[in-house]
Image: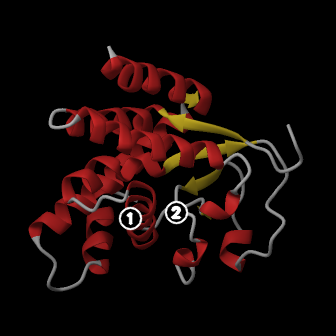
Amino acid sequence: MSAKQTVRALLDQLPDDCSIDDVLYHLYVVQAVERGQADVAEGRTIPHEQVEEELRRKWVLGSAR
Amino acid sequence: MGPRQREVVWTVQARLALDEAVAYVAQDSPAAAIRLLEPALDAGASLRSLAERGRWCQRWSTHSLEKCSYSAIVSCMRLQKRTLEFLLSCTALVILRGGKPVIRKRSQRAQADTAPEWLALAGSNSQSFRGI
């Protein structure tokens, strides 16, 4: 699906009274998911244990210092 | 690894998004940032065995995505600020590898899905995913 088709499909599914913020938010979500799918296709994935360890070390242990 | 245990992996995009969200909150309150991080990590870990926490979908439609991301925010994060939804929506993207297929009966649409199986992080209440 082309970018224009994706945007059209998105607009069709949003309520008529949606705001510009709503549109921007949903576009962001679609874009983020596409990036995630590209990550998977290209093998850019990280084991959960590694994510957990890195983020806890950075934010939990880091804030305790 | 048990019969229903799976390996949970994050996309680079999802990890980055969570890190950015935590950094954003930490600017105001490091404690609040940790309260944001911990449930997200716990929810990810629980996906190894609690597949019912999420909904299987190979192809994302905007409609399902919206509901999945909102469920993730409301149930896991307990935060509803638009900015956080904005940043956290893509933390829903984790994939599972290995293990046996989910045994419980799923919808025809879900049954049509094939690997790689996508799982949207959801809250503990799987009822919220009915009808999507």
Residue appearing at x 41%, y 50% in the figure: A33
Q: Nearer the viewer, residue A57 or A48?
A: A57
Left or right of A18 in this view: B4: right
Which residue lies at the image location 47% right of the left edge and 21% below the top edge? Answer: A54
- Looking at the rendered structure, the secondary structure element under dot 1 is helix
Is residue B36 in view from this perspective? Answer: yes
Q: Name the residue tied to disc 2.
A: B123
Q: Residue furthest top?
A: A65
Query: Where residue B82 sits: x, y (%)?
Result: 21, 59
Q: Does the image show residue A4?
A: no
Report the colour scheme. secondary structure
Judge left or right: residue B92 versus residue B22: right
- Check disc 1 and give the amino acid type: Val
- Per the image, the residue denoted by label 1 is B74
Local crowd size for mark 1, using a 10 Å CA cut-off: few (<14), some (14–19), many (≥20): some
Q: Position of residue B20 (x, y in %)?
A: 28, 34
Give whichever of discs 1 and 2 has the lower sequence position. Answer: 1
Q: Is residue B16 above or below residue B59?
A: above
**Left or right of B74 on screen, residue B107:** right
Residue A13 percent coordinates (x, y):
32, 79
For the residue marked with disc 2, what is the amino acid? Gly
Q: Up-down: is B65 above or below A43?
A: below
Q: Quadrant of residue B76?
A: bottom left
Residue in front for this viewpoint, B78 or B114: B78
